[in-house]
Amino acid sequence: MFNDSLKPLLQLFARLAWYNIGYIDWESWLAQDYTKEAAEACQYLAMLRPESIVSPIVDKLLLSIDNLIEAHRFTSLMHCLKRMTRQLVRQTSSYFQGQTYILPLLMSVLPGIDLNDIEKTSMTLDFFDAIFMLISCVDCSSAVHTRNDLNEDSYEAIAKAIQNLLRSLLNIYPMNYRLTREKLDEPFIDFLPIRIWGQNADFDQIQVQYHIPNVDEIDFACDFVNTFIYSELMFLKENFLKVSKDERLRSLTVISSLAIGCFRIVSRIESKEVPNLTLFRNEIIGERDNPCALIINQIELQIEEFELNNFRILTEIDKQIELKLFDLSINRYSEGCLYILFGNNHCFLPTKHSWTMMNKLWPLIVRRSYSKKISIERLIQDLKKQIEKQFVTIALIDNTNQTSEHAAIALWRPLEPNEIEIGIKIREKRHQTNIQSYNHLIDTLCSLLNDETSTWGQKKMAMSFLCLLLQKHVSIPSSCIETCLNFLIHDNIELRKHAVKAIAAFCRLQKLPRIYVEKSLDEILKFNDQLQPGDRDDNLWITYNNYKLPELQTEWEETCFLDKRHHGYYQWRKLIKYPINKRERYNSDRMPKHVSIIFDRFLDKNFIVKLTKVIIFDEREIEFNKLRFLMYKGLFRNFGMAFVNNFIEQLYLLIREKIQEKYEGSHRAASEIIAGIIRGSKYWTLEMLDELWQKLTPFLTEVSNNLNQESYLHWGSCFRYCLNDTDPRRMCRPINFIYKLIDQHSTAYTFNEASRWYLVQSLRVLQWRIPSIWCSIHEYAKELLDHSSKWIRERIAVILAMSFGLDLKLFDGKSARHPNTDQFSERIRERLRQAIDIYESKPLVNISGSSVELDVEARQALNLIET
């Protein structure tokens, strides 16, 4: 025995040994000197910790057998494994899995007997010699008749074999899946089999041969079942409380496999049928024009379906058995109830379309989410993940329209007036029940969140469920909104994340409707006789193209803005539907209570200060957070400029943060807020936008002048999110700001200039709709290909590649407004030729006496060549 304190050290040595053996590119001299020592080390480690060293080396050996390029790995691993054969074949209390490797190893290393490699052959034979000196080659297959100490894998394999045996004897199934029915022994001049590979088969000409159980097979199956099932049942009856759980599980597994295998021939017990209250409909999917094997598979499925249908009728005895099984499953262990909730792939109770059931189950799952037992805790977490994965918002109110009513009449018959009245009452009662269950569920989850005795884990689950339930058909209780606002500044990161998601959802549910206008194409376009994709005269008006803002608010509101990038690129719809550039916003004089809760909270400066502080310290958040961006976007969309001054004050504090630990988090938080402000201002008036950008321009200028390695990625994401899926004419102010960045020359260091070019890359989300901007950027960028900074040259190369991304050769269209790749190639070829001539004719360094000078022209030529 060795001291337990040495276990971690031994595990470390074992891991280092098996990880490195066979993966070092051994030189011949190195292998001779160190393979012996490595094998000896592995031998000693295997004696102490066989479970940590034997299995990994065997696995690596099996991987190296077919490696023809590096055969030395096989030899090195075999040398190590030969020294561990005793630990491989022994059964000890700590390691007994090694014996399972013996037969696979003996078969796998046979290719090591290679007459072209004497060393490899010798090592393989030495391994065989070492193994056979330690084991006795005796046929043990008859031991199953006298030994009952089967392990879990053994009895599960036997149970599977029992099922397969009984199914092969008692089931009806197709016997021949052969591709063709033609005689394959005919001369090739008459029939060539490769001609029919993958061909479809004639459904009516297939002569399927079925296996139908005969008397002998049925008798054998009955004798087989009688021989084993009664002995197992008697064993359980007499020794149920005496044997271990593993032994009971073994016996029940064998009984289950016997029962499943023979159920096809067991007649149903006569009993009263349970009334069928649901409508079943079976549909067979698939065309008859399929290959032969697939057709036979479909036939087999139909046979299986027919057999299952015959056993589908639920009788009173079936019902009693299922209820008894249910009682047994939850009698002694609470885990049984959790497994029942999991159900199977076809039935998952927690997401069943029943608000009444969800109202009962979800709070219980939250309350039960804390357990000292690891297995129960794991089950509950898996249950939570499954709910989040499978839950789809269920309608609280089911409305029908005339189209659905006409379809129902055509499918069945017109309803009588009294039937319609009864149906309306049933529907109204169901709606009322759904709403009551929904509100009660929301209130219960909120009470659990506000309960001081609830653990953080329970609150996380409750918040997760709460976010799933939000919908627009029923107003959200005020208590729920207040709870989520409180958790927005909670100490726990996960709770804050769920709260952000909830507030973003509230803002979306509370947004005021837009006013849409529908116009025909002739009303918008003066000409539309071109159908080819790409740049056309009729889609020039929706591009930026040196766009100038209108001076009057009425002109701004009447402008047809189309946000989606695909509008007009390929063709136009006959009717164009778009929202007018005007949207109502909440104000303090006209605001519902559930809206004023959010308004009052964000109007509080102290709340915003706390919010920005906790966001900075979200250690797990290393990237721009889209959920927070959506929350800010919703706030500024719904409430206009109400919060701008409060946020601007905090924004300056964030970007001027000097503490290194807070710096990156501060810029991330500031970039998310700015993106939300810009995107939320999409429908603001011209006056509001002018006032906003008077505040944002100096702020963003300060940001751009101080960009560094820790902040530039966040600000690039900021502009990318606020410009995505927007009409560039509507976003002309941020576009102009980004465009002006290329004219600024850094006074600090070149990385700042490279970072500003990274911000310019965010314009790529606008694609083909800013051609004049791309042309201007292209003209400016191509002159910087010989810049002295490698960072800037790399960024310029990316920008130029983006500008050429829309120079497409379409089938029937063209791309004429963007920088031309061919023209640039000609120009850059000429510049490269000149640069090569300069570099070859002038020395890069001029040495004059004691001074050394760098030739600027030669350096620029080299920079261009490197780029």
Image: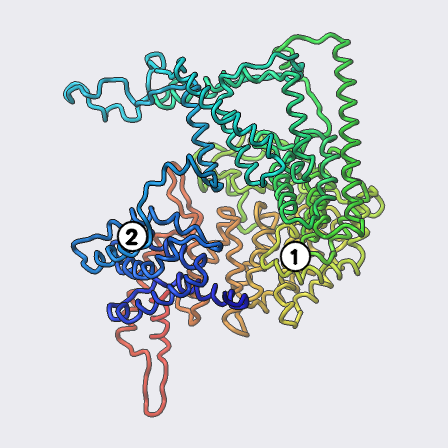
Instruction: Tell me the quarter of the picture where residue 215 sits.
Output: top left
Question: Dot 1 corresponds to which residue?
Answer: 674
Q: Earlier in the sequence, mark 1 or mark 2?
A: 2
Q: Amino acid at mark 1?
A: Ile
The answer to whether marks 1 and 2 mark residues whose Cβ atoms lie closer than 8 Å is no
- The one of 102 and 120 positioned closer to us in this rendering: 102
* Coordinates of residue 32 in the picture (x, y in percent): 26, 69
Residue 132 circle label: 2
- Judged left or right of residue 767, residue 730 is right
Look at 64% across and 56% down and name the residue there: 672
What is the secondary structure assignment of the residue under circle 1?
helix
- Judged left or right of residue 259, residue 404 is right
- On screen, residue 610 above or below 195: below
Residues packed near mark 1 inside 10 Å, few (<14), some (14 to 19) or many (20 plus): many
* Coordinates of residue 56 in the picture (x, y in percent): 40, 56
Judged from this view, the residue extending furthest toward the bottom is 850
Whole-Å distance between the Cαs marked 1 and 2?
Answer: 74 Å
Model colouring: rainbow
Look at 14% across and 21% down and name the residue there: 189
Look at 40% across and 38% down and name the residue there: 143
Residue 681 visible in the picture: no
State how many labels appear.
Answer: 2
* Coordinates of residue 478 in the picture (x, y in percent): 81, 43
What is the secondary structure assignment of the residue under circle 2?
helix
Residue 606 circle label: none
- Judged left or right of residue 467, residue 131 is left
- The one of 150 and 451 positioned closer to us in this rendering: 150
- The one of 235 and 548 positioned closer to us in this rendering: 235
Instruction: Tell me the quarter of the picture where residue 395 sits.
Output: top right
Q: Amino acid at mark 2?
A: Phe
Instruction: Tell me the quarter of the picture where residue 708 sits.
Output: bottom right
